[in-house]
Image (spheres, rainbow, N blue to C red):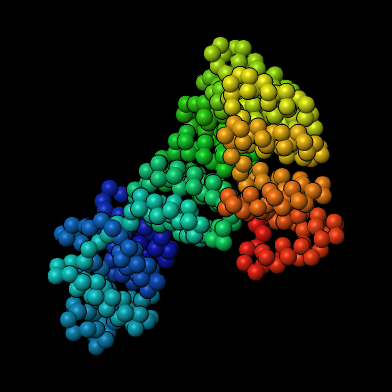
Amino acid sequence: MAHLHSTEPMSLLLLHHLHRPSSPLVAAFAAATMRARAGTLCPDDAHQLLDELLHQATPVPEHKHPLNDFLAALAGGAVHRSHLPSASPQPSAILPRPLSQDGLAANALIGRCRAMSSSSPTSPTLRVWSPIAAFSAATASVHKGTLSAEDAHHMFDKLLRQATPVPGRFLNAFLAALARAPPSDACRDGPALALALFNRVCREEEEGLQVAPLSGHTYNILMDCCCRARRPDLGLAIFGLFLRTGMKTNPIIVSTFLKCLCYAKRTDEAVDVLLRRMPDLGCAPNTFFSYNIVAKGLCDDGRSQQALDLLQMVVKQGGTCSLGVVSYTTVIDGFLKEGQVSKACNLFHGMKQQRVMPNVVTYTSIIGALFKARAVDKAELFLRQMLHDGVQPNKLTYNIMIHGYSSLGQWKEASKMLKEMKSQGLTLNIATWNSLITSLHKHGRSHEAAGVFHSITAKCQEPQA
């Protein structure tokens, strides 16, 4: 028991004891009791242990209650007897160092222990910190945008000081929430925080401590985090860690692996994995994820025709398999970004012939490209077709059209569209506001431009980015 006479922090002492079969809190108190008797217990360590006691959740059987022994150890060698409360156990004359150096601190500890002991007729309720409750609350805080990096690391500190790992699904829910969390005042980068916490998990596992059981779903979440954090290279490294665990792959995690390759601008490797190496990974490609991910990677690389050829090959090989609206929209958007508007429009008509209905994203992409090409008549034609098909324009659609009309000097049409947008309860973004005001100025309508600006500020409605 040599470690009990050391001056190492209580947190390290707890880590040593929490992995024994007995109750973690009982073991920690037993260790602190021996340190008190040996004269090596510092006031800060003792108060930290009492803080842990106050934040526990599961009662400990009374016959195992360690607080009275701890109190007796403090009082039995604490301070001169004239400083002790009258009801305390009989002390010896002097407490060995280091607690004996501060009689007031020793008395404060004894008083605190006695107050906790008298909180119930028999013994105080000892509560065990619940990782499930903590992670559930932390996940809710992420969704609210109130969880800070300090809060998250503090929770992991507590997790490391107790014996029960958090169930995997609660860890996964927490990491998934961080992966998708928008920047907030509390946490500017959720994906980066998730990766930092996972790094802690890996370090503890190397030391033989299991924070939580990791599953394929955990690794998939973290690979997605890497893509969102613009670190696909780390995502590929995490996929390597996953393979070394010996877990079985599945189409979902392989699809995320393909996404990492595409984000890392290794699209040719992604195509090779998709077409030839999937059996080596122990699974078949998932049409709705894998092919679309690689097709988008090709479009982002300016190879939209190759993406279309890939998807059409899927249709021929799949028999009853057909392309969906996401596949068509991905390639249409790719053609538009490459300036190949005619190819995009032809594919748009082709998807309708295949009875695949375009959605608001499809229409908005085409309308935006046509405005950019100054083909206003065609853009309006697609808008009418959109309404005829029962697809309602969204905020982005209106912003694109108002910006397009304004940039072409058609401020009357822009104003008309603005009124329609307001009737839908939608707002402009800052770029569109600027475009509208600039257009009014260019056409000698500075008074109206000033009116638009003042109407925004008067209502305390700042243009939204």
Q: Nearer the viewer, residue 396 or 215?
A: 396
- Please say whether residue 447 is visible from this viewpoint: yes
Left of 11 or right of it: where is 63? left
Left of 339 or right of it: where is 100? left
The relative height of residue 351 versus residue 149 in the rendered view (above or below) is: above
Rendered image quadrant of residue 27: bottom left
Residue 175 percent location from the top left of the image = 49, 46
Residue 113 percent location from the top left of the image = 26, 73
Quadrant where the C terminus sits is bottom right
Residue at 28 percent across and 58 percent down: it is 57
Residue at the extreme left of the image, as rendered:
121
Left of 287 or right of it: where is 46? left
Quadrant where the N terminus sits is bottom left
Residue at the extreme bottom of the image, as rendered:
82
How many circles with numbers are drawn on the protein?
Answer: 0
Q: Nearer the viewer, residue 210 or 32?
A: 210
Residue at 38 percent across and 46 percent down: it is 166
